[in-house]
Image (spheres, rainbow, N blue to C red):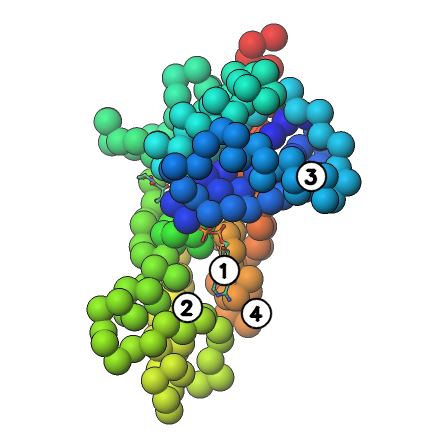
Amino acid sequence: MLLCIDTGNTNTVFALWDGDEFLCTFRCATEWQRTADQYFVWWSTLLHHNKIEAQIDEVIISSTVPRVVFNLRVMADRYFNTRPYVIGKADCLLPISPRVDAGTQVGPDRLANATAAFDRHGGDVVVVDFGTATNFDVVAHDGAYVGGVIAPGINLSLEALHQAAAALPHVDITKPQTVIGTNTVACIQSGIFWGYVGLINGLCERIKGEYDRPMKVVGTGGLAPLFSSGYALFDTIEDDLTMHGLTVIHRYNKDQNN
Ligand SMILES: Nc1ncnc2c1ncn2[C@@H]1O[C@H](COP(=O)(O)OP(=O)(O)OP(=O)(O)O)[C@@H](O)[C@H]1O
Ligand SMILES: CC(C)(CO)[C@@H](O)C(=O)NCCC(=O)O
Ligand SMILES: [K+]
């Protein structure tokens, strides 16, 4: 079985792939201090609790935080006796190389998203991924990642308002009924929710305007469902897009090495 690890700047997700489907998905906070042993205790406790028999013999990692990779490698070696594939490293091949400025390091999560979007939709796609950042990944007709947009993430924007303005509380993001808020919390929720609706809409329209073929828009990441109803922002929402990309990249590397 394949253990897929997606480390973002906020959260790290472990998902177990049996070749056909994900058997489980567990999430912890990303902390670079976390050791190989800590990961394994956390993971095996949750497997035990969920009565899942995992026979892991392979590991693939996407990490937007370089410092955590060392301990994840130690975990793969110590507990699963395997050398992991790490997206972005020379010995992890990509089905299609990104077309970006020379010297640019594309985020591994964006490369995984692009691979998954091509596998499922055949290219000409914009992926909108709501994580620590809200990023837009443009996938060309041939499946290459060709660039995109990085905007501040929703929770980051909420936190920034709270941090910088003494009178603004921390609020949870929900959809407000009206745009004009009649109390502080409602005003902030409106700024974030309707602000992001405008941002997503506006950026997708501009991306489509710069691109020479019709495009699909795929939403992914924890907050994508918030924007699912009514605004026609996305053609589909796929919450497992990054993880799916990890399984496709892993399969590709196995095929190349056989
Ligand atoms: N209504 C909500 N309000 C605030 N946060 C939410 C809400 N719904 C989901 N989330 C958050 O979304 C997160 C899942 O999103 P996702 O994994 O895509 O990104 P992330 O973990 O925040 O960022 P990264 O992947 O960059 O680390 C969960 O941690 C959850 O706390
Ligand atoms: C944009 C983020 C933070 C989104 O997780 C990540 O993909 C990243 O660190 N990227 C590196 C820069 C780039 O992709 O152009
Ligand atoms: K993510």
> Mark 3 — residue?
47
Secondary structure under badge 1? loop
Q: Are marks 3 and 4 in contact (CB under 8 Å)?
A: no
Going by the image, does 106 lie left or right of 51?
Answer: left
* Residue ID at (38%, 45%): 9
**Label 2 vs label 1, nearer the camera:** 1
Mark toward the viewer: 1 or 3: 3
Q: Is residue 214 left or right of residue 120?
A: left
What crowding class fits label 1: few (fewer than 14 Cα within 10 Å), some (14-19), or many (20 or more)? some
Task: Give the secondary structure at mark 4.
Answer: loop
Give percent across and percent down for residue 131.
43, 52
State how far apart marks 3 and 4 are (Cα): 34 Å
Confirm or reject: label 1 Cβ below 8 Å from ligand 1: yes
Q: Nearer the viewer, residue 51 or 251?
A: 51
Reading the image, the residue beneath label 2 is: 197
Ligand 1 within 8 Å of the CB at mark 3 = no
Q: Secondary structure at mark 3?
A: helix
Nearest to N terminus: mark 1 or mark 3: 3
Residue type beneath disc 1: Leu
* Mark 1 or mark 4, whichever is nearer to me: 1
**Residue to which mark 4 is pinned:** 229
Q: Earlier in the sequence, mark 1 or mark 4?
A: 1
Q: Local crowd at mark 3 within 10 Å, few (<14), some, or many (≥20)?
A: some
- Which amino acid type is shown beneath numbered disc 2? Val
Q: Residue at x 71, y 30 (%)?
A: 54
Q: CA distance from mark 3 to mark 2?
A: 38 Å
Mark 2–mark 1 contact, CB under 8 Å?
no
